[in-house]
Image (tube, grey):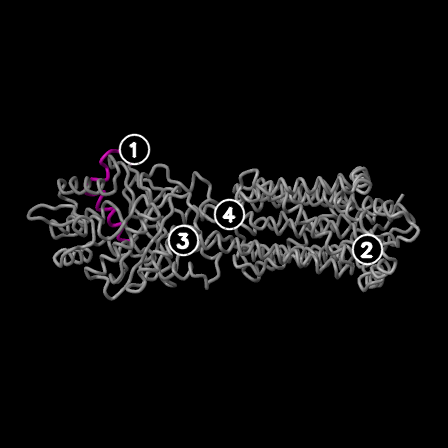
Amino acid sequence: MNRLKPAFLVRFSVEHPWTIILVAVLISTLAIFPITQLKIEPDVESLLPRDSSENEESEDLEYSADFDRLAVLVEGKDLFTLEGLDRFSDLVSRLKEELEAEKVIDPFSMITLEQAGSRIRAITMSAGGRAPKTPEDLAAFIRRLDNDPFSRGLVSSRDGKALTAYLLIPKGRPYLEQDKVIRSITETFKDSMKITVTGSIPFSAETERYLTRDALRLMALVAATILFSYYLGFRSRRAMILPVILVITGTAWSLGFMGLMGWKLSMVSIVSPPLVLTLGSSYSIHILNEYYQFPMTGINKQKRIIEAVTSVSGTIVMASITTITGLLCLLLASMPQTRQFAVSTSVGVAATALLSLSLFPAFLSLQKPVAEIKTQRVNSDILSRGLKKIAPALVRQRWPALFILIVLFTVFAILSPGIDYNTNPVSYFPDKSDVIGELKSFSREVGGMDEITIRLTAPGAQPNYFLQTEVLDKIYGAGVKIAENPDISHLMSLPAYLSFASETALGRKADFSNRGLNLLVSRMFLAASKTESDFSSINLTVRIYNSFEGRPIDEGDTKRISADLERILQENLPEGVSWEMDGLSLDFLELSSIMRRDFLVSTLAALFAIGIICTLAFKSLKRGLLALIPLITGIAATFIFMSIFHIPLDMTTIMMSCVAIGVGVDDAIHFLLRQRSEELSDPENPENAAVKALIHTGRPIILTTLSIVLGLAWFTLAGFRPIRYFGLLIVFTLTAAGLSTILLLPPLARSRKKTL
């Protein structure tokens, strides 16, 4: 362990403080520009693997990951008048122009079928695809809208009293800027109509607002907490200000690194800056605790600083290595944002550890020596006195400690399988959020915006297979059964469109016997959708939502609906027809499986890696395994907590275990290092060595745990739920790990044999 003590760096920093300070200022100055280039990535779809979020085979822009979707729902008693429809059209046109939309789907330009004498023709709902200009045009538009079976749940509400338009907008323009444009335009129309706007743009803009507000507020609160906890522990201004300067500098380096790499602050990595602030502050506690142990009277100040910092430098280096190791195990995750979080936070932790061994002693060397009364105050405070009283009794409680572990892991084994994984972005916002209110309002009036596309493929990819009468009949029947599900708000397919055509032309639904009509309408169908096909495959597109609660679907709804779709397809499709389902909701469901794998792999990898590091560092398998006890205890207790209170793992909280493993082992290492040192000093009395180690390390362990826990506790006040849950879970884990280090580790680590 002595090899880990960077004595030269500490000595150089104390002897040349201004050189160290100037270097730190220079690096921090260079970090300013890349920090100003950092942007927030609020688009939740960016978390999906690229190959699953984009249907490359589809030519429809609506399915492209390069476009945002915006839905505009308009209600009003005068809506279905010439003036009302003209204002609706004007609203959509202005949104299209200002947002530079690539495609618009509205009630006026939607294609419907109409009988013209003995023939059938495809025609727009309104003449010219524009708002009606005459009373005759208005009457024709209303008639076509009512007669078309596909308008409800798509371009009009389910009760037919409201209209909807959809805009497909190229991604790249700032979401807050676009949201401001949308609000400005809609505000001018709200005097005569009720407007509900939803989709990925307002959703992403609201996400960015929450993330920005949470990040800034958390960093300020964490910094204030560090000041408070350090003053409480050391009652000294230098003990307050110097650690804050140190961690702010390390956090700036971390953010500068992210900017240099061209990374963005995502829903995952947004927790990195306040996390670096919190974790980095713990290293200063070890230094200050050692620095305040003895009075400076009669001792050379520089020598004392070098001795104090060097004596705990091994602990700091070891703690930073384990923390970084735990974080870097997240590189095994599939999401790029998680890997970016791991690297950027590791850079911040490494920076704060380096600064604590260089910039911190440099600052201390420029300060006045600590007064003897302050060292006495630190060494005789309530923590020090309490540890001296309870340490002998705690060290002897081996069997109670084992009993607690057995009970804890038994409960963990029973409850942990019930923990859920949540990838539903809607659930990340507070219920009072405006964007959630508008999304729910749209769901109640129109139905779902979430789509599932079912791609059917003919046996052997046979051309024109899906134009055969018996095939069309079976697929239409399957579609009817699918539409019976109340959570299906809209269904579009070629057989359904042909059924509409036969009803229009022949007065009979689902009559697929007229081959000429089928060929004519199928060509119209392809022309309307702007695609080409040999009809060896067709799509069924359904819109889904939770009809019972009138809200967008969540992960459970997706599983239930997709299972029902699969059952119907298996039972009703012609023999040999294969299918596959695609859609954003299914992509997020797949992301849940990916998260589950990432969580298990990264957690096990972190435990294994930390165990190896501790074993090599202590040159003892026993001590390496002992170091893992507080970690495993903390994680088990957290899983029990999650199971009882139904807290899910999501894209942010899956990182909790690796962070907690890397951080939670620090206290165990500190205790075991001291215990080993005490055993070597007094090999005849191993029990006394454990007592002395607990008395000496208990104070900084409690203070570092309190500092980190109090800092991370502010995460629970975040508006964005993943950040709130991340803070709650990591606070619970580190608290449990800290208690385990104080209460369970000493009796379990106590040697019964004399140390040779």
Quadrant assignment, res 399:
bottom right
State whether the magenta stretch is mostly helix, strand or loop.
helix
Q: Earlier in the sequence, mark 4 or mark 1?
A: 4
Identify the magenta region. Answer: 459-481
Quadrant that contains the C terminus: top right
| Residue identifier under label 4 | 40
The amino acid sitting under disc 2 is Leu
Q: Residues under labels 4 and 3: Cα distance? A: 15 Å
Q: Whole-Å distance between the Cαs marked 2 and 4? A: 44 Å
Report, in whole angstroms, how far the alpha carbon at label 1 lies from the one at label 2: 73 Å
Instruction: Give how far apart the Cα atoms at labels 4 and 1 are.
Output: 47 Å
**Element type at mark 1:** helix
Nearer to us: label 1 or label 2: 2
The one nearer the camera, 494 or 353, is 353
Q: Secondary structure at mark 2?
A: helix
Which mark identifies residue 179?
Answer: 3
Q: Amino acid at mark 4?
A: Ile
Give the position of the N terminus as an image quadrant: top right
Question: Which numbered disc, 2 or 4, marks the residue that appears first in the sequence?
Answer: 4
In this view of the protein, can residue 619 be seen by the observer?
no
Q: What kind of residue is marked 3?
A: Asp
> Residue 246: horizontal and vertical position, in percent?
70, 48
Q: Residues within 10 Å of mark 2 (few under 14, many from 20)?
A: many
Q: Nearer the viewer, mark 4 or mark 1?
A: 4
Give residue 108's position: percent from left, percent from top: 22, 52
Residue 706 located left or right of residue 591: right
Residue at label 2?
Answer: 694
In the image, residue 432 lies in the stretch drawn in magenta: no
Counting residues from the N terminus, which is met first, the one under dot 3 or under dot 2? 3
